[in-house]
Image: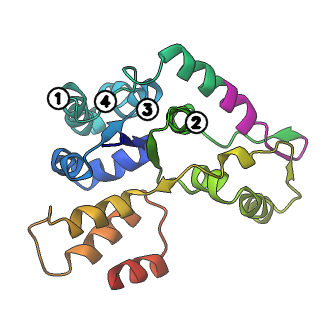
Amino acid sequence: MKEKAIVFDSGAIITFAMNGLLDIFEDLKKEFNGYFLITDEVKKEIVDKPLTIKRFQFEALKIKDLIERRILEFPYKIINKKELDNKTNQLFDILNHAYFARGEFMKIVSKGEISAIALSLLLKEKGIDNVVAIDERTARLLCESPSNLQKIFSYKLHTEVLMKKDISFLKNIKIIRSSELMYFAYKTGLFHLKDHILEALLYAAKYKGCSISFEEIEQMKKL
């Protein structure tokens, strides 16, 4: 069977954590039958830093447990760590120098997001099918529609935003959100509640960090 993976950015895991849904990750991984991968940069954002903040310690400990039980895994038996670090740094420079406004480049993506994208690119080079789970709209649009992102920036900043880098090499990266993962979990019977559970899940994701529109929720309910 061909290897496959989901590469997780911080935001998608945090959405599950904030909704008390981390417990389904083990069964979700079994249903997916592939790797659930995170990078060191993502671990810093979802475990290392939150463990120092009392408000977020409980969720961080549950995520740490998922890592210790290898439900969430690091990619280093597949990808060389130095290679990933180099690719992450290369992308960090490119993507944070892609949009220019008011005399300076816009810092638009975090190291965690970029490391997830870098890992996806390296996995593709090795022939491993993968998707990246990203809830944040900016990082998603960088891959799916960088020109639309340029228009959004221009609208929000009320000024012209220029694109200084060709980032079309990101177009083949496949993006999913926590909402799609929740939908998959629902369809595979991982939730025992019945009445309105799908709608409740999607709205929970929306209000806890996932960039999904009301229209998209209605469409998913009809699938």
In the image, residue 28 lies at what x, y percent?
A: 22, 51
Q: Is residue 147 magenta?
A: no
Label 1–label 4 contact, CB within 8 A: no
Would you name the residue on which mark 2 appears? Answer: 114
**Residue drawn at x 91%, y 41% as measured from the top left:** 103
Would you name the residue on which mark 4 appears? Answer: 73
157 vs 60: above or below: below
Label 2–label 4 contact, CB within 8 A: no
Question: Start and end of the magenta stretch?
Answer: 90-103
Q: SS at mark 4?
A: loop
The CA span between labels 1 and 4 is: 9 Å
Please report whichever mark, 1 or 2, sits nearer to the chain's N-terminal start.
1
Q: Residues within 10 Å of mark 1 (few under 14, many from 20)?
A: few
Front-lying residue, 129 or 66: 129
Please report whichever mark, 3 or 4, sits nearer to the chain's N-terminal start.
3
**Residue drawn at x 20%, y 25% as measured from the top left:** 68
Would you name the residue on which mark 3 appears? Answer: 42
The CA span between labels 2 and 3 is: 10 Å
In the image, residue 101 lies at what x, y percent?
A: 86, 48
In the image, residue 168 lies at what x, y percent?
A: 74, 49
The CA span between labels 3 and 4 is: 11 Å
- Mark 3 or 4: in front is 4
Instruction: Using the image, tell me which numbered label, if any, was put on residue 69.
Output: 1
The CA span between labels 2 and 4 is: 18 Å
Please report whichever mark, 2 or 4, sits nearer to the chain's N-terminal start.
4
The image's colour scheme reads rainbow
The CA span between labels 1 and 2 is: 25 Å
Q: Residues within 10 Å of mark 3 (few under 14, many from 20)?
A: many
Q: Residue furthest front?
A: 1
Q: Amino acid at mark 1?
A: Arg
Q: Amino acid at mark 3?
A: Val
31 vs 40: above or below: below
